[in-house]
Each structure stands twice: as structure tokens, then as C-alpha cells.
Amino acid sequence: MTHDPGTDGRTDTTDSTGSADSTDSADTRSETYAELAAVGPYGVHPGHALITMVEPHPGHERAYNRWYEDDHYIAGAMAMPWIFAGRRWVATRDLRRLRYPARSAVARPVTAGCYLATYWITEGRYDDHLRWTVAVNRRLNRDGRVHHDRTHVFTAFQDHAATVYRDGARGPRDFHALDHPYAGLVLEVVDAPDPGGLAALLEWLRDERLPRRLAGSPAAMVTAFTPVPLPGDRMPYVRQVEGAGTRLTLLWFLQEDPRACWEPWFTGLDGEVTAAGLGRVELVAPFLPTVPGTDRYVDELR
């Protein structure tokens, strides 16, 4: 770029070819960003989430982990508008052996899905974020920055439905959950029998089952989300979400390693839902937080 004073005393900004097109484009872009920032929702509530559980293909675990953490977590998620928090989680082979039920509508087999990534999206900004993320992921794929030796087991954008806290107003809120140093996470997926039963299932979970289960437990909170259909122009390697309109995704945030508290606190969740006659538990799966910048746990996946 060259900056030469013009005859009227102003600075004439041109590119190396003598054209002002690049500057005009930058000015327009700057104005567009300023206009977008001045309108629309900009609260701190996690009104939406991206929850994605992925299985790297055997032999590609380390390469997948490095690609996702060194590139995709940032360029394919955190750098995008309206994602304001993210956290990655990992399920070692001993953790995956704890999963149930054996016949799961989510993970086939139930042990599929070594890595989980969770992201919060500002309430009311899902459509804005989605338009950006579809465009960026097309670009990343075109530029050879997508790791294809992986399978999406459970990937869905989701709308926030409820948050239940163990300690009421004390402690971190749901908007802190992906930044707070929780020691573990349990992913639970529950299906209502039909769309008409989803509200009753959510009400029972929110008002009865979750407060009872949280009392005295190592879980500080549970967030509940409902999956929404993926857009038709999504990347072809991401399959359409199942259960939109009948499914709840619960994230239990733990203050202990899930292996230390599994038996007393996280067995039997499926029996409770079945006994209530409100649906079926399709997955209960524990995870540990990854350690950014390392390949910790990679050698414990197989």
C-alpha cells in the first residue's frame, strides 16, 4: 500500500496497482461491522449451544486432536461471531466403558465418540452465527483445513431450555460453565415419546428429578438444551440431527472426576425416566476436560 498526499491535502490511499478498490472495500466492511454491532441482542445468556461428539478414525487420534485444538477450535468456532465460550472434553477407554444404555439411539456403538466440544452462543444470535459458520466451514474445507479422518457421532446446534443449580444463587452461573475449571462433564440425552411429550419431560426433569439428583452431589449445575435441525447447506460429512422436537441434551458439570463419583450418582438415570413414563434415556456418557496445548489422554483412547 502507498499513501500519497493529494492535491486537496487529503491522503490518497491506493493499493500496489494504483487502485483504491481495496480501501473502499475495507471502509465498507468497517461500516458494516459497526452497524451490526449497534443492533440486536448482545446479552451474556447462553441461549444456544453447539454440542459435537466426534470419533477420530483409528490411527488418527493424535492428528485429529492437534488439528482440532491448533486450528479448528479457533478458526472453525471461537473466532466466529456470537460464540462466547467453548470447552473440549475427552472420554478415555475406561470412561467409555461406563456409558449406557448398551443400545443407544445416539452412539452406535455406545462407546463411539472420544471427543466432545461444547460452545455457548449468545441468545438471539443463532441465525446470525449459522450464516457465518456455514460460509467459514466451506472456506476451510476448500483450503484443505478440515480433518476428514473422523466421524460425527452427535453434532447439533441446540436451543437452551433450562439450567438447574445445586446451590441456588451461589457459585458459577451457566454462562461461566465453559470457563470454570470443572473436573468433568456427563452428557445425558433423553428422548420424549413424541413432540407433545417434550414439555412434560422437561418440566419433570427441571422441577423434580434434577433438583433431587443435584442435592449433595458433585455436580454444580445441569444445563438442558433441545437440538434443532441442521441447515440443508451444512457440510456433507455432518449428518442431520435426530430427535429434533423430542430430545433433550443435558450437560452435568462436575466438581470431581466422574470416575470417582459414577456409581453413587450417575447409575440408574435411565430407570428413573422409564419409571416416570415420560421417555427414554439414550445416552449417559462421562468426560474429562482436555488439557489445551497437549496430547494428554490420546494414549488412553484405545
Image (cartoon, rainbow, N blue to C red):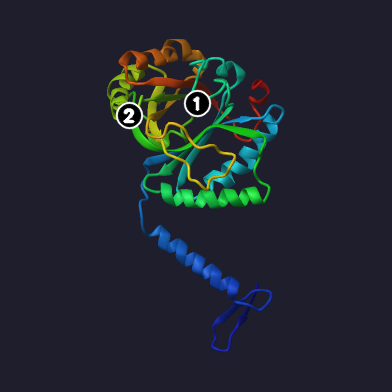
Residue beneath disc 1 = 106
Q: How many marks?
A: 2
Q: Is residue 169 visible?
A: no
Snapshot quadrant of residue 203: top left
Q: Nearer the viewer, residue 225 or 299?
A: 225
Q: Nearer the viewer, residue 241 or 142?
A: 241
Distance in Å between CA atoms under marks 1 and 2: 17 Å
Q: Is residue 52 visible?
A: yes
Residue 181 point in image, percent of width and height? 49, 30
Check the image and report above or below for 209 versus 291: above
Residue with the most extreme right position: 59
Going by the numbered disc 1, the residue's amino acid type is Val
Residue 210 point in image, percent of width and height? 33, 21
Disc 1 secondary structure class: loop
Q: Which circle marks residue 269 in the picture?
A: none
Q: Residues within 10 Å of mark 1 (few under 14, many from 20)?
A: some
The answer to whether residue 71 is left or right of residue 192 is right
Q: Earlier in the sequence, mark 1 or mark 2?
A: 1
Snapshot quadrant of residue 269: top left
Residue beneath disc 2 = 198
